[in-house]
Amino acid sequence: MIGETTYSKYKFSCFIILVVIILFQCTLTSQKFKFSLITSSPHINSNNEILIGILSIEPNLSLRNAQRKTWLSSNVFDFKFIFDNVSPGLVAENDQYHDIVFLNASYTGKAYRYGEKLHLWFKYAMKNYPDKRVIVKADDDVFLCPEQIKSRLLQPGAEKIYYGWKHGNVADKNIGYNSRIDEQFVGVGHDLVQRLADSDYCEFERGKTLSMSSVKRLKQNCSDSLPDTNYGGTSLGMWLGKFDDVMPVFDNDVLIHYNGPVYTELSTRIANHEKVNVCSDFYLFHKSSEEEMYELWTQYLGSL
């Protein structure tokens, strides 16, 4: 009995020691995560006037690296890759590149509460980089021409600009749920972003349906806060639709959206390594693969 009791105490002691070790490691990991959130980044240059947040998911490393090696390497923009939450793999990636922000989002999943991610990004941008004239949210499959996009974003009145590829009638300058810029690349002026960052996010659950009745319920339940349609583009359209001093700039002619009329033709020509007048005929190519980004960047550099 004495032997069994001693052995039981020994096992219990080992268990306690193991728990302490695990808790200690978790504390160190947590501190590392926290540190990675506030690490200064060589990609943040106070002389640049545009800050781009590129929404990504962990498996898309090849797309992120393609952007890092192509148009982001121009140093025309300050940028951060933004993620819902922290993970060991992303911490290791940030240790290498120092260009990641974790939003600590309350909601995750495809096409769910993207409005919250956008609002968190705006709040982060205003808190950490309040001097930027334009804040952009982009996708990790976008290729763009740095100098051309910079020129379009930093036009007179940039502090209230709403820039990108518009769904619906381009001639209609009204802004709302059905008249908004696609979230694959949307630039918003500092003054507008500050207002949104200072606003409350609405927790009202829209649900998965896309009916206009659900949009009406959103407006009713979020009249004094920012509704979330589950998509960043329509959410932002509703948010900015409340203001009467927004400067909309719709560049559908030079921003190639994957639902646009010339996307398929361009994609085929790029795949065949044909010259496509990149940064002359168009300034942005949506749904780019990493191979397409490298091809477009090679053509762009060859045209300089």
Image: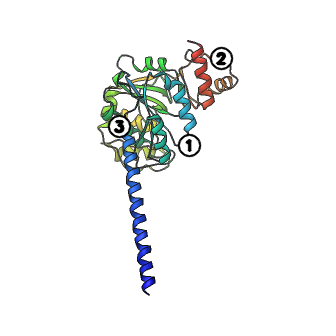
Q: Residue furthest bottom?
A: 1
Residue bearing the label numbered 1: 59
Q: CA distance from mark 3 to mark 1?
A: 24 Å
Closer to us: 76 or 156: 76
Q: How is the image coloured?
A: rainbow
The residue at 41%/64% (across/down) is 19
- Tag 2: amino acid: Lys
Q: Is residue 94 above or below residue 159?
A: below
Q: CA distance from mark 2 to mark 3?
A: 40 Å
The residue at 44%/17% (across/down) is 151
- Tag 1: amino acid: Pro
- Tag 3: amino acid: Tyr
Q: Earlier in the sequence, mark 2 or mark 3?
A: 3
Q: Quadrant of residue 4?
A: bottom left
Q: Residue furthest right?
A: 272
| Residue 270, horizontal then vertical, whole percent | 66, 23
Residue bearing the label numbered 3: 124
Q: Earlier in the sequence, mark 3 or mark 1?
A: 1
Q: Is residue 210 visible?
A: no
The numbered mark at residue 275 is 2
